[in-house]
Image (tube, coloured by chain):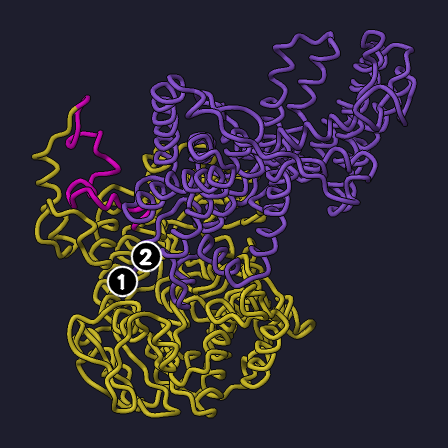
Chain colours: A yellow, B purple
Amino acid sequence: MEPGEIHALLGENGAGKSTLMNVLYGLYQPDEGEILVDGKPLKLKGPSDAIAAGIGMVHQHFMLVPVFTVAENVMLGAEQVRGRFTGLLDRRRARREVAEVSERYNLRVDPDAVIEDLPVGIQQRVEIVKALTRDVDLLILDEPTAVLTPQETEELLAVMRSLKAAGKSIVFITHKLGEVKAIADRITVIRRGKTVGTAEPSASRDELAALMVGRSVRLTVDKQPAQPGKPVLEVAGLVVDDDRQVRAVDGVDLTVHAGEVLGVAGVQGNGQTELIEAIMGLRPVLAGSVTLDGQAVHGWSTKKVLRAGVGYVPEDRSVDGLVKEFSVAENLVLDIYDRPPFGKGLSLKPDAIAKSAKERIEQFDIRTSSADAAVGTLSGGNQQKVIVARELSRPLKLFIAAQPTRGVDVGSIEFIHSRVIRERDIGTAVMVVSSELDEVIGLADRIAVMYRGRIIGVVGPDTPREEIGLLMAGITPDAATTSPTEGTTSPTDGTTTPTEGTAAPAPEGPGNEDEA
Amino acid sequence: MSTTAVPEVAVTAVDEGFWTRARKTGLVLLGLGVLAAVLFGALATGQQARFTLSETEGGAALEIHGTVGAILFGIIAAAAGAALLAGVPKRWFTLVLGVGLVAFVLSFLCWQVSAAPEGRNFMPLVNVVRGTFILALPLIFGALAGVLCERSGVVNVAIEGQLLMGAFSGALFGSITGSVWVGLVAAAIGGALISLLLAVFAIRYLVDQVVMGIVLNLLAVGVTGFLYERLMQTDATKYNSAPRFSNWEIPLLKDIPLLGPALFRGNIFLYVGLLLVLVIHLALFRTRWGLRTRSVGEHPTAADTLGVRVLRLRYRNVIMAGMVAGIGGASYTLALYSFTKNMIGGKGFIALAALIFGRWSPTGALLAALFFGFADQLATYLGAIGSSIPSQFLAMLPYLATILAVAGLVGRVRAPAADGKPYIKG
């Protein structure tokens, strides 16, 4: 690393990027090898050593205490105190520090705002401020754009540029090629824990992708135009609360036809999860109706919904999709274990289960040591394939996939996408919910954008990314001209303003990602 | 089919919006107020209900006609309920609710006091306040122990055991050495020992903290019960006759009417308990230790990435909690009674309820503990004036208050996010 350099660390999920950086931040201990800072070997016993050595890190999952204020989060661990024995906190000084750093690097945050009230983009800013108040020279950003809207991403890239101008070095971990090309000075590609190459940002996307996965992959989804049939799923006026009894879905109407893919785009936490869970019978429907093939299914148990011909890939596979301790074979029949040929009366038929498991493992290219291996020992991509295999093994009317490729390697993404399209082509209605805009654009025949519990717009897949991005931030095309501050919802200074989002010139920026 | 279902469900959804928590509470309070005005008003006699500002019948007193008082306070309670039902600003909710509940209790007292037999139809407020504090004291210490533990993310169900162990060691070592101070230190160590076990199993070996807490309570009952029978019952003068702290009068403060005699002529435990509430509250919200404790209880991984040593801090807090609870246990044996088997008798669990009722804050816990203490004291008082309510019901009062408070008034409160979750690095 050189001072004032942005170094991108590119690799698939599970390639070892985050582990490497956690070692650098002192959270994990290296088994072998050493870290050199200014030519001297550095021994890190914990994060405090790393901070002392001028290394700061913004974690993929923010390390912020949700009920604390910004200032409290920033001072935690490096508190300024008055009086040596009492240890009284010097809040005024902490507030001033936050204000100073925000001023210097143009990272506006309100020191007294409580974290859980802030939008994700601002929380990330707090994380950066937190690192900067500790006088770091090297800042590690671990997958910083995973949770951001395209506009917020643009803002973050601008912040990174200004930090670079101030002489800070940045390690930027990601698997998104567009962002890397937009901002990085140097690129290191990691695969399976090894450095497989370095590249200049001028390298083409296909070259980088090939380095990442070790073979060339297609970045677009191959598909024919859809042949939509009759409506299969109809949702009308749906109202659903989240776990905190806060309205999460607020009057959603949507229809999915046989033989089409409806993509649901939106920044995480705008009601997509609750919408899907309500359709699946996992969450009470407070008002409105859900109709499957002309039959009202709201109020049904999840099992009944599944049996009615609905396939479901839940958004968090480790919590809702799989029983980690169970074998691959067992997980493959979790939905129909009590039906012939897998079960009869009180007993299971292990032979039938094993035989079917063998077939599925082959069909869906699930890489596992055996059908009896615990599913938790598989890689993320292969776990996801187990779920997809299970759900697509039944005749379906409707297939719902929530975040089908989150945390999944590029090879598996390609495979899962082709399976989704194949399901569409045999006439199943498909609904894909994803916070990856590229995935939605690639798969969907129509895109519904959710914002604050409502469908704010339904657009075609050839709609410009910027427009969808604005919709995700709550700005409809006509509203954008009349009230440009619509999107600035945060109490401090808003997520982004449209002018800033478009002003940053980024010919190769993430705005154009994967349209090639 | 779906068309018929839509409006039906939609109606309930609208209802949800109107029936906020405040409105539901208001409705209940309104009902209680009307009930009080009618029922207590009818049952009260024309006697004067006297609330004396002393320990006896004489002296300055607040007096009110029994029937008038019962009806008047009932109406006030009903009015407060109606106000909540009509909708008051959110920050006024607690105040209005408090006024309503106090009025309800006063209405009840007007009935009870005026209906008491001649010569006993007065309420000595000094005794009531003092009794409330004395009965609340173990709860205060117990709830503070809970605050220290749970704010750092360790669930403390073992408060009962810590109090009991403190009471026992205080009595035993106080008796053997003949010194209250040695007894006090021994009590703190006794409570800390139970805590240490909790800490080691919960933090080091990741045992379920609730299960561990229950096991420790049983252990404390078993160990102290066994030693009580073997040592204390065989030679009570040697092992179970601890010296007691005498009451200390605080100059000036002791002359404040009502509060002076009730609060400032007490023993060291009362002063220490109240002081601890203040100190822990300030420490928790104003100091480095407090910030770190709360961060570890909410998001230990975040604290760890900033160089806070999560496990060490938890160990320290859990052990401190044990010391506080141990001293609380000694407030029995080094000030009031000699040790008896299982003498805490569930107060540790009420302290746990006070902790939750008080929303994991020291001052909140103090208020909750006083609430329970008052219910307890009221039961005693009503028994003494020969109330027409059967004594079994009076004995239920504190526990009933606990259930109502925790289930009804508090509803959903937010515990520290990492409470009860062991921290595993990496």
Q: What x and y, as percent, mark residue A127?
A: 47, 71
Residue B262, quarter of the rendered image = top right
For residue A404, which numbered disc appears in the image? Answer: 2
Query: Label 1: which residue?
Result: A408
Q: Are marks 2 and 1 on the same chain?
A: yes
Nearer to the camera, A383 or B100: B100
Instruction: Report crowding for label 1: few under 14, some 14 to 19, many 20 or more residues within 10 A (C-alpha).
Output: many
Q: Is the residue marked by circle 2 packed among few (<14), some (14-19), or many (20+) residues within 10 Å?
A: many
Q: Residue type at mark 1?
A: Val
Residue drawn at 39 percent across, 50 percent down: A229
Q: In this rendering, is residue B69 above or below B306?
A: above
Label 1 is found on which chain of the structure?
Answer: A
Q: In which chain is the residue bearing label 2?
A: A
Instruction: Give how far across and how far down residue A437 sits, in percent.
Output: 41, 67
Q: Is residue A108 visible?
A: yes
> In the picture shown, does residue A124 fall above or below A504?
above
